[in-house]
């Protein structure tokens, strides 16, 4: 029996670690300290331990930004679960503290949501085993929220519930919060960057009867350890989880993000191997303590998946997948990098100050992704699959009914009538975007303020902001900024003074606080010399990244009253001060440098050695005939900051064509171009160059081209049925028994489908001689009446038709081929061994020719 403090919930050894970290946190809190001590005085012994545990393991931004009453809510609910929850007495203390009690999942906003979720679920799971409860809870999550792409700010679990949607990071944050609310240990795990395709993904692990198992958040199955990402995760080079407690976890650590330790969970999902990195100084001696970054190519940039330091011998071993890594090393101003194909090379040596990069020369790279090799093969019976689909359909129906009930027309009409006619349609549209937050938007619209100013403020925000912003916050920003409305042109005033959004921070009121916190003399000096704002903020805020968490941004009030703020917080608070004083300011969208409007242009306020305040250098990217260069998707530019290359954000990750002149600071840059192949590998090129002050360079982008043989895949396809024209079912395997099958799921009348049908018709002679069967898959046979399809069929001799519901089977096939589910037309070539060898979703110019090349090779 472990020794405990009297009858308290945690052991003495555990609490000794907690007490040390708690006291250190308390000493940082400034004005908040008394508030925490008052909350502790109201607690039982167990509640006090729980509250101390939370403060000991939270980033300083949480302690600065949220009232102690919020964390007391988490502590009280945690104690209730420990003593009387559905699974009380079955969870080890460290697992309970880190994955049930703890308030933070990732970088979401925090609300007192746990008791609310518990009340929603405890009767539904009453009497169920932990595993059955987990499965049932995930169906409930699917009833409440679904996937939708959004911006990078992570909404709270409560906001996801009230909005009924979120991106994968938000769905998993929501689901983890729900599991924890009923006493089931849960954590978010994620691939920071895929290797076989672009972007990333997050899901959930739950601690079920002593073991960690996984599931897709809001994507219920009838069993655990199953999700659409099972195969995809087998091709990852890293899978992360995070640990916030001061007690060190027992898992392999691959770095830290601020105060959070990052654990390597890859072996749960993929075949792994070790790569040993040795870093040497320029003189050949071991470089102990050198910082090593392990990176994968995702979109057209190398992104970090692990970061560590070398030991006394200058070595570091990483467990990873069988693909390509870029390994970089840095120490004392010296840098090195090397591309390592881990499938062929299990060790590498980096000598600081030496690099393979040649200046002003395009160099080629082949970056390989691990092959598809899942270690989790969960086989379900046909009965289980059908039962699960029916439950999922019911969950979807409930969620859609919930979504339909969000919009209250009576509330919307009343609020819109407070606005002039020309604004009403947009006001209603915004209230619809607000989902469960409609009443806050309506309340703001009803305020007696200049209508045009209210609409300009709302239009300056992102769509996600409508989901969780408050009427009081909107009112404060509108009233306080109104005094500067006539001083600046609208193009400057609205986005750079009126708009409260600076980066990915939670929008809170800050203007009245700043006006009261700054003295009259400070405000006057800042207005006369904006550069003083940056000096002032740097003097008042201490930065210690090991007290922070990721990209969490502390509010102006939280930062200035505690005296702590990350480097990003300092920049955001500086912009907030400048906008409060009526001075246009921003973070430059490409590199997040703090800028202020001066003499007709934005100039940098941050000073770096040898850097001017204006971007006097630059490159001119030339557009090439027949080529579309889309930023992020197939090219990027990164600036060397002395320790690493930092990609400039010239567009969002959806990509935009970027041509013409790009203003830059002097320095060393690297351009990367990427040609992602269907098999997941990337043919890449890089160009490293140095820009001097005032220098302009013309750059013609280059891409490494691929042969047909480089594009093929061998993905095993799970068999399923489609319907013949007479209604009888037919398995895909029957259709490819004798020769390959070219399957096209068509969306008649839509432009992407029209394009591919026209291309096939124009090449009908070649398609009539294909060494493969041609199968059109449609929703019903009425599709044959579509004019474009009818013209195409008139030219084809052997096309066959099948009917499908375009549901779960089609989506599973798309995911298996690493394509976007639901994107049509879906084209897949399947060989006689039921392997998908080529696929494309949507329309790409030249798809019909590519199919011919592959099938006739």
Image (cartoon, helix red, strand yellow):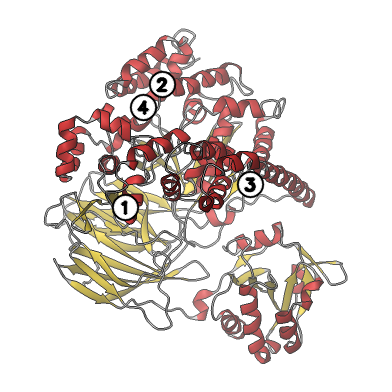
**In the rendered view, would you say 665 is above or below 796?**
above
- Write the residue at 69% across / 89% down: 769
Instruction: Name the residue rendered at 20%, 72% in the picture.
Output: 696
Q: Earlier in the sequence, mark 2 or mark 4?
A: 4
Is residue 333 found left or right of 367 in the rendered image?
left
Q: Residue 219 bears which disc, if any?
A: 3
- Residue 182 appears in the picture as rendered: no
User: Residue 683 at what x, y percent from top left?
Assistant: 41, 72
Quarter of the image holding residue 552? Answer: top left
Q: Position of residue 838 (x, y in %)?
A: 59, 73
Screen quadrant of the C terminus: bottom right
Question: Whole-Å distance between the Cαs marked 3 and 1?
Answer: 33 Å
* Upstream in sequence: badge 3 or badge 2: 2
Q: Nearer the viewer, residue 365 or 310?
A: 365
Earlier residue among tags 4 and 1: 4
Q: Report x, y in % for residue 761.
A: 67, 86
Q: Which of 431 and 744 lies nearest the eye of the viewer?
A: 431
Local crowd at mark 3 within 10 Å, few (<14), some, or many (≥20)? many
Which mark sits nearer the N-terminus, 1 or 2?
2
Q: Provide the residue designation for mark 2.
A: 68
């Amino acid at each position: 029996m472990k020794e405990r403090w009297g009858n308290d919930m945690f052991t003495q050894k555990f609490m000794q670690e907690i007490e040390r970290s708690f006291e250190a946190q308390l000493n940082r809190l400034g004005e908040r300290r008394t508030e925490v001590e008052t909350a502790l005085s109201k607690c039982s012994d167990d509640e006090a331990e729980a509250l101390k545990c939370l403060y000991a393991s939270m980033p300083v931004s949480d302690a600065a930004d949220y009232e102690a009453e919020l964390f007391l809510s988490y502590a009280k609910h945690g104690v209730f679960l420990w003593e009387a929850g559905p699974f009380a007495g079955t969870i080890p203390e460290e697992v309970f503290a880190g994955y049930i009690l703890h308030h933070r999942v990732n970088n979401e906003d925090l609300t007192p949501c746990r008791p609310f979720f518990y009340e929603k679920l405890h009767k539904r799971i009453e009497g169920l085993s932990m595993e059955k409860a987990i499965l049932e809870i995930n169906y409930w999550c699917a009833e409440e929220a679904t996937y939708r792409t959004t911006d990078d700010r992570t909404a709270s679990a409560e906001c996801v519930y009230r909005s009924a949607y979120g991106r994968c990071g938000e769905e998993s944050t929501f689901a983890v919060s729900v599991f924890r609310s009923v006493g089931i240990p849960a954590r978010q795990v994620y691939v920071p960057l895929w290797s076989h395709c672009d972007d990333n993904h997050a899901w959930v692990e739950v601690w079920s009867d002593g073991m960690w198992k996984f599931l897709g958040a809001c994507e219920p199955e009838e069993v655990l350890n199953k999700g659409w990402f099972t195969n995809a995760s087998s091709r990852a080079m890293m899978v992360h989880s995070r640990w916030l407690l001061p007690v060190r976890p027992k898992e392999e650590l691959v770095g830290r993000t601020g105060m959070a330790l990052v654990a390597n969970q890859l072996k749960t999902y993929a075949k792994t191997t070790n790569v040993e990195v040795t870093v040497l100084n320029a003189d050949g001696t071991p470089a102990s303590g050198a910082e090593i970054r392990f990176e994968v190519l995702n979109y057209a940039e190398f992104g970090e998946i692990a970061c560590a330091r070398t030991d006394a011998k200058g070595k570091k071993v990483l467990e990873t997948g069988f693909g390509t890594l870029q390994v970089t090393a840095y120490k004392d101003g010296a840098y090195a990098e090397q591309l390592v194909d881990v499938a062929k090379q299990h060790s590498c040596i980096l000598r600081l100050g030496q690099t393979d990069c040649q200046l002003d020369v395009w160099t080629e790279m082949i970056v390989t992704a691990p092959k598809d090799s899942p270690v989790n093969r969960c086989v379900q019976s046909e009965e289980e699959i059908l039962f699960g689909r029916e439950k999922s359909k019911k969950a979807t129906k409930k969620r859609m009914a919930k979504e339909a009930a969000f919009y209250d027309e009576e509330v919307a009409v009343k609020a819109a009538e407070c606005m002039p006619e020309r604004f009403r349609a947009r006001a209603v549209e915004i209230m619809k975007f607000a989902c469960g937050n409609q009443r806050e938007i309506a309340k703001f619209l009803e305020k007696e303020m200049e209508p045009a100013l209210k609409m300009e403020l709302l239009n300056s925000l992102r769509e996600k902001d409508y989901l969780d912003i408050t009427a009081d916050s909107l009112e404060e920003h509108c009233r306080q900024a109104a005094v500067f409305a006539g001083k600046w042109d609208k193009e400057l005033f609205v986005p750079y003074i009126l708009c409260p959004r600076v980066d990915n921070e939670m929008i809170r009121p800050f203007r009245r606080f700043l006006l009261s916190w700054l003295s009259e003399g400070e405000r006057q000096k800042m207005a006369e010399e904006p550069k003083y704002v940056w000096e002032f903020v740097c003097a008042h805020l201490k930065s210690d990244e090991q007290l922070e968490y990721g990209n969490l941004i502390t509010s102006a009030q939280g930062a200035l009253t505690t005296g702590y703020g990350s480097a990003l917080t300092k920049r955001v608070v500086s912009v907030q001060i400048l906008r409060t004083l009526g001075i246009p300011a921003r973070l430059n969208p490409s590199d997040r440098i703090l800028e202020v409007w001066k003499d007709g242009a934005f100039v940098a306020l941050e000073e770096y050695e040898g850097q001017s305040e204006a971007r006097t250098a630059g490159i001119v990217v030339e557009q090439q005939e027949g080529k579309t260069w889309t930023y992020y998707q197939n090219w990027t530019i990164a600036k060397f900051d002395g320790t690493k290359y930092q990609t400039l954000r010239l567009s969002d990750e959806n990509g935009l064509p970027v041509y013409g002149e790009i203003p830059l600071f002097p320095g060393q840059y690297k351009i990367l171009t990427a040609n992602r192949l269907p098999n997941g590998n990337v043919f890449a090129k890089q160009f490293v160059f140095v820009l001097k002050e005032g220098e302009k360079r013309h750059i013609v982008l280059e891409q490494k081209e691929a042969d047909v043989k480089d594009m093929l895949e061998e993905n095993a396809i799970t068999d399923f049925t489609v319907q013949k024209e007479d209604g009888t079912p037919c398995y895909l395997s029957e259709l490819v028994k004798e020769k390959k099958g070219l399957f096209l799921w068509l969306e008649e009348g839509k432009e992407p489908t029209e394009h591919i049908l026209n291309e096939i018709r124009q090449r009908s002679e070649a398609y009539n001689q294909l060494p493969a069967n041609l199968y059109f898959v449609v929703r019903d046979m009425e599709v044959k009446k579509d004019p474009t399809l009818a013209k195409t069929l008139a030219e084809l001799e052997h096309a066959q038709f099948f009917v499908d519901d375009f549901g779960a089977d089609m989506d599973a096939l798309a995911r298996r081929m690493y394509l976007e589910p639901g994107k049509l037309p879906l084209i897949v070539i399947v060989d006689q061994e039921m392997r998908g060898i080529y696929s494309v979703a949507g329309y790409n110019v030249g798809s019909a020719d590519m199919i011919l090349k592959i099938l006739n090779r």
